[in-house]
Amino acid sequence: MATPATLIYGDGIGPEVVKATVHVLEATGVEFEWDEQQAGLGAYEATGNPLPDATVESIERTKLALKGPLTTPVGSGFRSINVALRKRFDCYANIRPCVTLPNTKGPFEGIDLMLYRENTEGLYTGIEYRDDRNDIADAVARYSRKGCERIVRYAFEDAIKRGRKRLTLVHKANILKETGGMFLRIGKEIAEEYPQIQFDDRIVDNMAMQLVIRPQEYDSIVTSNLFGDILSDLMSGLVGGLGVTGSANIGEEHALFEAVHGSAPDIAGQGIANPTAIIRSGEMMLRYLGENAAADAVATALHDVYAENTHLTSDLGGTASTSEFADHLAARVAQIV
Ligand code: NAD
């Protein structure tokens, strides 16, 4: 039976890369009943609302969304719809695998890292104060036991499912004794329930340095919102950039799969965008649904097509258009499944 899922094409290159992803997902034979909805700048221009009620109701119903990048006006206008969606559906776990593909010109070979980022608390609660009289501004970093427990537990459970061996908790508990201290303390408590996974911790500044010197020594990382935001982009850089890394936002009931990169207005409409990042997100969606054979087929086909080096997009030095890359990849997927 086809799985109902909300499909948001998004802004800029969104429609091009999402269409390519749907084509590749169809090649796996897994059937989706797509409910196409709008969000972002396009939705705002069409309806006056960047997050129409129909879109929220659709995700409420399907509990599953594949979403292209959304443009957020800088400095003024509406706030990020990406952040609003994650909050609205309490998608507390942001997962970003970083895996080396051949011919991506990353600085290292053989990277295979998982990052689990807490997605709803920390410095991203939006609680900020400004004291104009004294020229001071404060931001609140909110940590709760519930928030810390659920992201650490999610990381352990997911790491086990993926056959991972080690989980490193990243924090700044030496300076942030209450917030970072709480995250580390709860991490250590929960680690006792998972003796099959090697658990350790690193201070974030040291972790950033270690990741750019010897990333192969690490396996899975769990961290708080701000550190996860920064480290996950750093890790994308280790494997060839934002164009090749997918992302999933998982909650108790809902899951949103999206590209890590933005709407790339500079190349929108030219048919040259690399759809790999959102195809990776589609692969994560298949795995989330328990369609592991289909997800493995997408991963293997991506590896094969990158290794061939004949159908890559221009960001990677190739000459293929978005649809030529997607057609070639979909054909490879169909051979594998
Ligand atoms: P961006 O990621 O859109 O683009 C940065 C650079 O990378 C550009 O040169 C672009 O051409 C290139 N690029 C990005 N994705 C690519 C792809 N798939 N293939 C080839 N090249 C690619 O970042 P930006 O320019 O800072 O942001 C543009 C808009 O996107 C902003 O409105 C921003 O708020 C939004 N944004 C949305 C998301 C999201 O929806 N999750 C994430 C980041 C930024």
Image: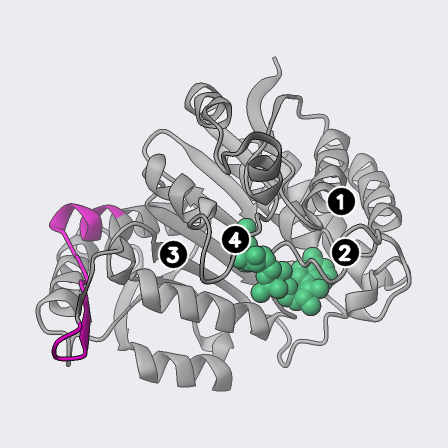
255 versus 11 height, above or below: above
Residue receiving disc 1? 16
User: Quarter-wise, where is residue 335 in the image?
Assistant: top right
Cα distance, mark 1 to mark 3? Answer: 28 Å
Most foreground residue, 36 or 21? 36
Q: Return the disc, 1 or 3, that comes first in the chain's sequence.
A: 1
Crowd around label 3: few <14 · some 14–19 · many ≥20 (10 Å) = many
Tell whether 114 sits left or right of 141.
right
**First in residue order: circle 2 vs circle 4:** 4
The quadrant of the picture occupied by the N terminus is top right
Across and down, in percent, residue 187 comes to 19, 59
Question: Where is residue 178 shown, x and y percent of the image?
Answer: 8, 68
Q: Which mark is residue 116?
A: 3
Nearer to us: label 2 or label 4: 4
Mark 2–mark 1 CB contact (< 8 Å): yes
Q: Is residue 201 left or right of residue 300?
A: left
Label pair 1/3, CB-CB below 8 angstroms: no
Disc 4 marks which residue?
72
Magenta residues (range)? 132-150
Q: Secondary structure at mark 4?
A: loop
Residue 118 position (above or below residue 227): above
Disc 4 under 8 Å from ligand 1? The reply is yes
